Image (tube, helix red, strand yellow):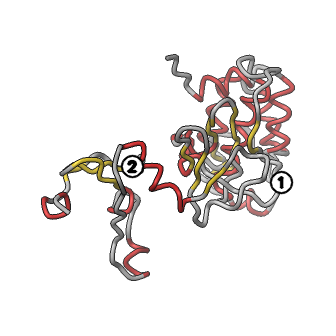
Amino acid sequence: MHVHLFDELLAETLKDDEARAWLLERAAITGSLRAACEEMDPEALARTLVGGITKRELASPSAESLRQASAVPDDFFLRPRPNHLFTRDTSCWVFDGVTVNPMAKPARRRESLHVEAVYRFHPLFAGRDIPRWLGLDDPGVTLEGGDVHAPRHRADHGRHRRVHPLPRAAPAVREDEHFFADVGDLLGLPRVRVLQAQQDVQAAEREQWDDGNTCSLSRPALSSPTSATSQPTRCCASMASR
């Protein structure tokens, strides 16, 4: 297995002038910021697109708007994208094809543009006949790859506020009413019992991702988190014995 680091893939993609122009245009980077980005070498540009750039870091920023004129030196002219850490969200490989996921939250949409640039222009992918199950131009669709599971010969996806219905071009998608039955089949269990937190709306608002709703019990006394922010934990004996 070969592990590719995304920052390296993006930097290698940005060696292509066409890729660089395509990405800066789609990301709506204009004016003095666009000029500064065009002067950067590929590695520096990749770091800037992911890590952002402040007024202080921009060599000679020009005040092209009231916001820029009133900015203090440490204000960002290009916001960082720290959630790039979660590469499973912006893209996922399902069988022999790939998705580039339209993200529901505006703060994450530029991440998908970076991934699209890699698949479109990087030598590893450019010109290859790879099925595209979902792309950024699919209307009315949002999806995060962490909500997609591909057991056996079909794909399942969850349904919540960050996921909207997938187009018919996607391969045999079945929604979450079948997911737990599939999990039971894969684990060799006759059924899967779903434990739900008993809480009101206010309590739910205060919860973080590493809570009981992101854990599954695969064998007595051991729970497994489904969130990247959680670690495996031991369940209490009373829960494990049920």
Which residue position is annotated with label 2?
A: 229
Instruction: Give the image quarter of residue 19.
Output: top right
At 67% across and 38% down in the image, what residue appears?
Answer: 49
Image: 172 above or below 39: below
Q: Nearer the viewer, residue 88 or 44?
A: 88
Q: Quadrant of the C terminus?
A: bottom left
Residue 75 position (above or below residue 14): below
Q: Which residue is mark 1?
A: 64
Count of marks placed on residues: 2
Q: Secondary structure at mark 1?
A: loop
| Residue lying at the far left of the rendered structure | 237
* Residue at x 60%, y 66% (from the top left corner): 161
Q: Is residue 72 left or right of residue 17?
A: left
| Kind of residue at badge 2 | Thr
For badge 1, the amino acid type reads Glu
As helix, strand or loop, the secondary structure at mark 2 comes to loop
Q: Residue at x 69, y 56 (%)?
A: 142
The circle drawn on residue 165 is: none
Question: In the rendered image, which quarter is residue 131 located in?
Answer: top right
Q: Please state the horizontal and vertical placement of residue 113, each as a whole percent of the image.
A: 73, 41
Query: Where residue 119 appears, x then y in whole percent?
Result: 73, 29
Q: Which of pointers 1 and 2 lies earlier in the amino acid sequence? A: 1
At 74% across and 44% down in the image, what residue appears?
134
